[in-house]
Amino acid sequence: MPAPTRNTKGVAMTTAKIDRVAYIGWRGIAGCEVIDLDEELTGFIGPGGAGKSTLIMCLDYAILPDRRALDIRPVSDLHDSRSAGIDSLAGRIDPRYGYAYVVLDITTRDKQRLIAGIHAEPVDGRAAFNLWLIKDPPKDVSVQDLMRCVEGEEIYFPDFPALKRQLSAGGIDITTCKTIGEYGLALYEAGILPSSMNSASDRKLYANLIETTFRGGISQEVATRLKDYLLPAQSQVQDLVRGLQECTNEVLKTRNAVADADKELALLESTYGIGKETVLTALRCMADDSATSQAAVSSLQSQLANKDVTQRSLEVTIPAVKAEIAVAEQTKKNTLAASILILKGHEEKKDTAFQQLGECKAELERATAKRRQFDQGAKLWGMVAGLQIKHSGYEAVKEWFDAELERINRDIYGIDVEIKKLKEEDERLTGDRASMASEHLADVLGGQPLEQALGHVSDKEALAQEMSLGGLVDGVVGVGLDALSDLSPTDDMPDMFWLGEQLPEVRPTREIGQWYVNATSGGYVVASMTRAPVFGREARKQRGAAIANELEKLKGRRGDKKQEADRIKGRKDTLLMNHEVIHFYLANRQDALAIDKAAKDAQKAFDQCKAEHEAAKKTCSNLQDEIAKVQEPYDEKIRELNRKLSKDEQSLSGLLAEVAEAQKRLQEEMARLAGCQGELAGAKNLLGGEFDRFHTECMALILAAKNITGQQAQRIAELARTLGAEVAQLDSFRNVNAEDRVSVVRLWPDLMTIVRETVNIDLADSDGGDLIQAMRDQRGRLDGDLATWETELGIKAKNIYMSISGAVKSQQVKIGKLSKLGQVIEFGNVTGIQIKLAPRTRLLDILQQFADQLTLFAKDKPVDQVLKEFFDASAAGGVKMSGEQLLDYRNYVDLAIEARRKGGDWELASSLSGTESIGGGLAIALMLIRSIASRGEAGNSGVKVGDIRPLFAVDEASRLDPDGQRMLVEFAKREQFQLLVTAPTLKPTYNCKLYALYRHFDPHERLIIRGIKHREHAGQPAT
């Protein structure tokens, strides 16, 4: 095989590429639709729903036919809730076929021909694939000829079993692939795939790259799973963990022995320390409470005797004070009787004056309201009627408003009619009836479209040209009949057109009524004067500008008329909304002086009534002051007697409550005293002969000032923790309560029983002093054994740290080599892409601390769980990883994608612009593909990285400006990959092939695809 050439950047130039792709059996496609792929860029253009993304989806499945790994769907499916749960691919197979094909026509890296494809058919609602290959087919046989079957005059494309029989009968071998790996191996050896895709991980990565480049940018999934793609798992750490766990078990065994010794020692210390202290405290509290209750009973009995004397004195004083109050009130009543009678007469006069004042006020309000309504009506009438019609009547003014509004509306209607006529004329002038068929015909024959050649003529001349041609508008100027000898009719050419080297001659045209008439063979061609011609586009543009100026002037006049109408309507609305006030004014405007005089007279009468009422009020007030002076001495004496009565009654009520409370407390204290004496009797019965000794010792205790019950509960809980399982066997511990002091004393006999049954060393004396020392000596020997095992544990823990840190350094070197593949990739202002591995220094430091300190906290748990607890305690906020993940070196590094611009430093790829981000996504995909290819395949050492030419698809390329699109084309050409884009429309300035897609549904669904080839000539834009 000849050695591949290299481009200016040193990238090997391979001959491998997908030349064309054929589609059969998909919705809207009639027969076999073949798309020729350009070496530089192929684009699908057309409106939404035309099928651009569907064609790419089918092509991607033909390159990687793994439906579990690859899930690429058109955006319309993702946003359509009706497509949820429906297989997108199966739904696109034409039900008239029941099956479909996607066929790749490939030139391999050794310049051979390979046909590869998928056969899809619905199985249980999901599209299932048959993968097949045709190696070294005849080069002069097209894809259509290979796939179709001809029987007489019938041409069809058979299902897969029939296709195999037909090809076999024609001497062409077709291979059915049993696995994706077998199919992928053929595309790998051809130079299309970077590996055979036999590995599920390779297929998943390549599927993610297809989906990433299709959406544009750098996929979040690819960025977050770079570790899985690039960093291998490590098994050495697991072996070290098993050795560490065995050593940990020995440490735990020794620690358990130490714990047993500590338990027995704690039992002795608790029994003769905490246990005895708890019992003595309970006895002391019993004695103290008994003495306190006895003193309280004596004090309460003395208080009750004193309160009884005070109660008898108050019961005599209170009736005497009540009698004095009754005598004083009767004397006051007799003295004030005459003065109150005089005051009553003046109060009646004041009430009469107040009634008259109300009547005058009502009359004043009526007169004032009438004058206010009259003044308001006069003001509104002057504002509405104005100076010209002020002296007319209400109905006359209203009719004048209606007449003015009708006149203005007629003017506005006339202006609207003129505007409508101008707009209709403008619509006729701006109608574009350009023919894509003529443009394509001119492109094929090399001439100038007829529409373009006649673009400068006037409307009348343009219409005369159309009539001279008999209504024929498709054609080419500058081409002779010789050009037809090599021209074959196609669907994208007109089936009838005009052809000539010079412009067509114009026959004379005349006007008859609203029609243009042109004589022709045996009759006339007639055209409406309102017809919008195809020719004369430039002349129509000039008339359109003049119409726009006329429309602006008419709109200004209409706005002035509208403002005038709004002013008239506002005055009319004011007249109608205030018709009652205005009618009142018009009816009474001759009585203006009388209305004003009535208001003034009412005001004068109101002022007089108000003065009389004020004089009556003053007289009553003076009499009330005189009465108050007479009754003041009596009131003072009565108030003093009431204060004394209230004080004595309150004292008696409080005294009775105090007596009841004291009697209640006396009963409670006597009951408490009886309870304390009962507790002491119960304790004496439990302790027997030891009671006197315990009682003497408890009286020497110094108790805490507060929370004795809480301290007792803490002592009992600590004692229970020391005894452990022994507590469950004893009723005294199950029923003990810190507030029940007898239950606390009941613990002592059981404590002594536990000591005799648990401790292995014979009791030396009743206090247990020698027994405690013997237990301390045994524990010291166990501490020495524990230190030996913990030293060995530390050594093994450090080995884990060394293994993980070593793996991090090794992979850092490997990723550096991979980054060199991307550091020479250039697109736009970006001069390189790299993947950077950064160790997580903080986590590695914590891991080293774990290795140094493991002996301090090793527990009866797996090593990975202990490691997780250590990291959670050491790192702020803990770590979001399990213990098993913390034993994986890949979680101690970060991978980042960085880009370098011209004249700049390396930065995170997130800083890239939209165009650069799409280029960055392609660059990362290219690096990973080359990384896969660099591994090679067993038995295929002849395939080099430079032999691989992948195909990438980018959706919605219209997001990029023309410079961005050109950048991607140059990038693809330099780095040797094929590029396929979709967009509603493109105006390329670079070499490419475009396919315009249109989908029709009447009378049945049909996808129309028209190819347009663009080539750039001598620095001019592509055409």
Image (cartoon, grey):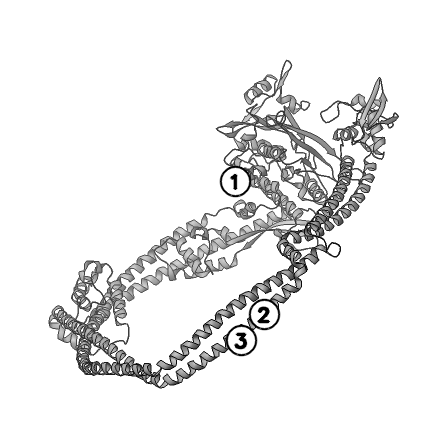
Q: Residue at x 70, y 55 (%)?
A: 384
First reached walking from the N terminus: tag 2 or tag 1: 1
Q: Check disc 2 and report the residue beneath it.
A: 603
Q: Is residue 522 left or right of residue 183?
A: right
Circle 3: element type: helix
Circle 1: element type: helix
In this view, the mark in front (2 or 1): 2
Residues under numbered marks 2 and 3 in contact, where contact means CB atoms less than 8 Å apart: no
In this view, the mark in front (1 or 3): 3
Coordinates of residue 756 in the picture (x, y in percent): 17, 64
In depth, the one of 640 and 459 nearer the eye is: 640
The Cα–Cα distance between marks 1 and 3, rounded to whole angstroms, is 109 Å
Q: Is residue 32 above or below residue 958?
A: above
- At label 3, the amino acid type is Ala
Q: Check disc 1 and report the residue beneath it.
A: 201
Coordinates of residue 388 in the picture (x, y in percent): 76, 55
Quadrant location of residue 463? top right
Q: Give the residue at the far top of this rendering.
A: 152
Query: Is residue 650 in view from this perspective?
Result: yes
- At label 1, the amino acid type is Ser
Q: Quadrant of the C terminus?
A: top right
First reached walking from the N terminus: tag 1 or tag 3: 1
Q: Check disc 3 and report the residue beneath it.
A: 611
